[in-house]
Image: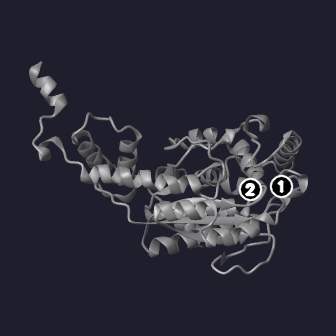
Amino acid sequence: MLYHETLKQIGGLNEEAMLSARDRMDNLIKPPGSLGLLEEIAVKVAGIIGNPRPQIGKRSVIVMAGDHGVINEGVSAAPQDVTWQMLPAFINGVAGIGVLARHAGASIAVVDVGVATDVEIPGVMKCRVKSGADNIAQGPAMTREEAVAAVEVGIRVALREIEQGATLLALGDMGIGNTTPSTAILAALGGYSVAEVTGRGTMVNDEVLGKKRQAVTSALTINNPDSADGLDVLAKVGGLEIAGLAGVVLACASKRVPVLVDGFITGAAALIAAAIEPKTKYFMLASHLSGEPGHKLMLEMLGLKPMLNMGMRLGEGTGAALAMHIVEAACRVLNEMVTFAEAGVVDMEEDKLLKG
């Protein structure tokens, strides 16, 4: 089975490459650590790829789309049809992710892994496991078998992108109502109270927020997900697009390709991937800090530092697309700056030592 084969291939960071990259970074013509997080990113990418002089070439954003039965609980201000109606805008490059992916020089793969409405949209990969996740406030989102199937969709799409030369992947999502299952995932895996982690999502007023909190509470009570089993949490309170994105993370980890986590929904997928295989955290990069209150908690659980803090909460992979520039910049610094020795410049720290 592709799922199990992928898990077997996931290892750790290449420590030798990281040590070499860190040594070079510390000897570039600048004070050590003066480029902050940029330096950490370059060293981590070196460890992911296994090359002390990493370079970023072709890049891709994978947008997984799926619907949610929990929409029937009144948890969203937007109608469910918006999910499929947005997909042509992604393909045509006129949605937020289309503009920012184009700006980043990235291609977009848009995948229907669980859209409720059966529509044919040119350019959208039709890999539907089922027509929307079931209502998590009434029972499980899907069976365990469906969860694995959706994860495998993500694995296949990511492997295809990697085989076609992608060196950096980004996670993107589309699914009306998907902040509700993402909140349930965070609460289940992090042990947080529903009140702590439930944000407003998109255009949500106090009444809808109350319904959302109740839906998450019901989902956790009725389904009782096992926090020690990431696949169980996914099947019981997750979503199909979240499953697909978790599969993308697993595939990237198995092939040693860095993957950019976007906001709250993709953060939930990253949590699921890490719960399934903790070593996947080594291959993730956090693009930004979302405006959703629970996103900070997700990143803390994953041990990731966000590159940007811009109050963004659109999803789609928009923050991850922006961060592609930063990842490339980090690698360019490592490769294109010279060391003190190469430049024939006295190392400032060494000069201090010599002068006593």
As rendered, which of 100 and 293 lies closer to the eye?
Answer: 100
| Residue type beneath disc 2 | Gly
As rendered, which of 146 and 312 lies closer to the eye?
Answer: 312
Q: Secondary structure at mark 2?
A: loop
Q: Position of residue 227 (x, y in %)?
A: 70, 46
State left or right for residue 235 relative to residue 274. Answer: right
Q: Residues within 10 Å of mark 1 (few under 14, many from 20)?
A: many
Q: Position of residue 155 (x, y in %)?
A: 57, 68
Vertically, is 256 above or below 190? below
State left or right for residue 314 relative to residue 99. Answer: right
Disc 1: which residue: 136
How far is disc 1 from disc 2 in space, using C-alphas?
8 Å
Disc 2: which residue: 238
Q: Residue at x 25, y 43 (%)?
A: 23
Q: Residue at x 49, y 61 (%)?
A: 103
Q: Residues within 10 Å of mark 2 (few under 14, many from 20)?
A: many
Vertically, is 75 above or below 92? above
Task: Give the mark count.
Answer: 2
Q: Residue at x 42, y 72 (%)?
A: 165
Q: Are marks 1 and 2 in contact (CB under 8 Å)?
A: yes
Q: Residue at x 51, y 53 (%)?
A: 322
| Residue type beneath disc 1 | Ile
State left or right for residue 146 relative to residue 319. Answer: right
Q: Decide if residue 12 is in sight here.
A: no
As rendered, which of 131 and 190 lies closer to the eye?
Answer: 131
Q: Secondary structure at mark 1?
A: loop
Q: How is the image coloured?
A: one colour
Q: Position of residue 149 (x, y in %)?
A: 68, 70
Toward which corner of the image does residue 135 lie, by quadrant?
Answer: bottom right
